[in-house]
Image: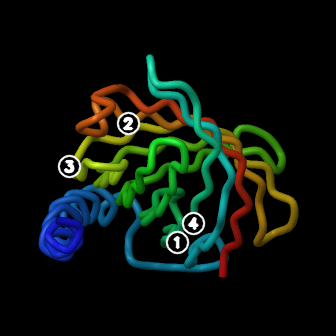
């Protein structure tokens, strides 16, 4: 059964991200133009988090992400998260917005799609759900930042069937 679940991931994930990338490209291209300079670049980072699913307790989690940020503050992010207590993993693709609110501080907005798989003892499940996020970023250096973010994935998990509320603290580097 696990092979069936893992076998379906390569088919579902690209289809999910193709729609999202097309949508983001249609919006980002006119806003950002094609020029790139110091504000644009690839990003990579990691985070630790606490997730709560109503009625199912909390989970300490970890995650990794990579992406690309355009000059205008818009970006694309691909993330992986392991929710250890729920025996769940989430791969997500999202559009991000970074807006300067003070020296070194930025407001972060995120909208995307999460593809989740769960494999608790005796049960396997997977599906897609929307992902919404908001947070703050503090520039530690010109290319490194500390991020505090809240994410909501409503209705995730066949077994959980609950909203996943996550608060994460992460470090991100721009290349």
Alpha carbon distance from label 3 to label 1:
22 Å
Name the residue beneath numbered marker 2.
153
Res 64 label: 4
Q: Secondary structure at mark 3?
A: strand
Q: Residue furthest top?
A: 55
- Between disc 3 and disc 4, the foreground one is 3
Q: Nearer the viewer, residue 8 or 46?
A: 8
Q: Position of residue 88 (x, y in %)?
A: 41, 51
Alpha carbon distance from label 4 to label 2:
17 Å
Quarter of the image with the N terminus in it: bottom left
Dot 1 alpha-carbon crowd within 10 angstroms: few under 14, some 14 to 19, many 20 or more: some
Q: Residue furthest front?
A: 122
Q: Residue at x 28, y 29 (%)?
A: 161
Q: Are marks 3 and 1 in contact (CB under 8 Å)?
A: no
Depicted 5 relative to depicted 51: above or below: below
- Between disc 3 and disc 1, the foreground one is 3
Name the residue beneath numbered marker 1.
66
């Amino acid at each position: 059964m696990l092979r069936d679940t893992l076998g379906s991931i390569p088919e579902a994930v690209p289809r999910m991200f193709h729609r999202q990338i097309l949508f983001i490209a249609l919006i980002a291209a006119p806003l950002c133009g094609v020029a790139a300079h110091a504000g644009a670049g690839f990003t990579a980072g990691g985070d630790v988090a606490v997730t709560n699913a109503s009625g199912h307790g909390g989970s300490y989690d970890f995650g990794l992400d990579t992406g690309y940020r355009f000059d205008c503050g818009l970006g694309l992010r691909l993330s992986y998260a392991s929710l250890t207590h729920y025996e769940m993993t989430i791969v997500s693709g999202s559009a991000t917005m970074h807006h300067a609110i003070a020296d070194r501080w930025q407001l972060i907005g995120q909208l995307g799609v999460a593809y989740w798989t769960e494999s608790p003892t005796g049960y396997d499940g997977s599906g897609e759900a929307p992902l919404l996020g908001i947070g703050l970023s503090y520039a530690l250096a010109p290319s490194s930042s500390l991020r505090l973010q809240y994410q909501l994935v409503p209705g995730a998990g066949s077994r959980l069937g609950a909203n996943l509320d996550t608060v994460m603290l992460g470090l991100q580097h721009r290349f």
